Amino acid sequence: MPKVDDAHFAARRRQILDAAAACFAREGFHRTTMQDIVRESKISAGLIYRYFTGKDDMIAAIAAEWHERRTAMLGDDPAAGYLDVLRRVGDPATRAELQLAVQVWAESVRSPAVRAMSRANVDRPVAAVAPLLAGASADPASLARVFIAIYQGLVLQTLWDDDLDHAAFVRAVATLLPDPAEPGPGADQE
């Protein structure tokens, strides 16, 4: 069998993950069959199994990519990046992605592998952001988790409420973020 170059491998993997994500967002993880993914991707089942061991493997890959994108969006200014992540939730083009996110969160209750990955994808941002919240009056790690919960809550509310005012939501959250120009409560004052 001829060796597949890295670009071709990556493109085929992307094709499969995009098809799986579309199916999962539309039907959920448990209602989606491998045959649905075969049909959506236009790739044979045998070839799909050369890239992934099954649906759980695809779910983990999709969730890992999803969290990597969120982390990258934080950039050099985590507060501004966080607000951008919240704004993106309001973009109608992200609806299928949001539906998939909720599916992943639900799957994390059932699957130890997805739970471990989801947990790590919360723990890493908490560890990265907590030092930036060190001057806050609350425990920095707990406060970072509150901001993650705000994001998760916005995702759910966006899926439930077509009339949600995302701009107002983001403005309200911005008032909760520490101002980097002002010293925190524990900082030395002159």
Image (cartoon, rainbow, N blue to C red):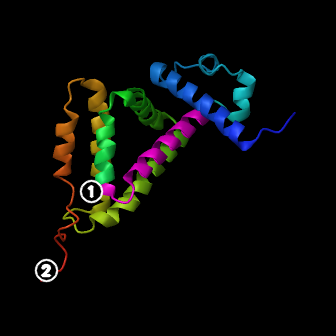
Q: Where is residue 115 in the image (x, y as percent from the top left)?
A: 48, 42
At a point 69% along the width and 28% down the height, the residue shown is 48
Q: Distance between the residues labelled 2 and 1?
A: 23 Å
Q: Which of 22 and 54 is in front in this view?
A: 22
Disc nearer the start of the sequence (2/1): 1
Left or right: residue 111 versus residue 137 is: right
Q: Which residue lies furthest to the left in this view?
A: 190
Dot 1 falls on a residue whose secondary structure is helix
Q: Quadrant of the C terminus?
A: bottom left
Numbered tag placed on residue 189 in the rendering: 2
Q: Nearer the viewer, residue 107 or 47?
A: 47
Dot 2 falls on a residue whose secondary structure is loop
Q: Can residue 75 be seen in this view?
A: yes
Left or right: residue 9 versus residue 127 is: right
Q: Where is residue 20 in the image (x, y as percent from the top left)?
A: 56, 26
Q: Does the magenta stretch include residue 62?
A: yes
Q: Nearer the viewer, residue 91 or 108?
A: 91
Left or right: residue 2 versus residue 141 is: right
Q: Position of residue 167 (x, y in %)?
A: 20, 38
Q: Residue furthest bottom?
A: 190
Q: Position of residue 36 (x, y in %)?
A: 59, 17
The quadrant in which residue 134 appears is: bottom left
Local crowd size for mark 1, using a 10 Å CA cut-off: few (<14), some (14–19), many (≥20):
some
At a point 58% along the width and 31% down the height, the residue shown is 17
The quadrant in which residue 19 appears is: top right
Q: Nearer the viewer, residue 36 or 5?
A: 5
Q: Mark 1 points at which residue?
A: 143
Numbered tag placed on residue 41 in the rendering: none
Q: Which amino acid does label 1 sit on?
A: Leu
Q: What residue type is labelled 2?
A: Gln
Residue range corresponding to the magenta coloring: 56-79
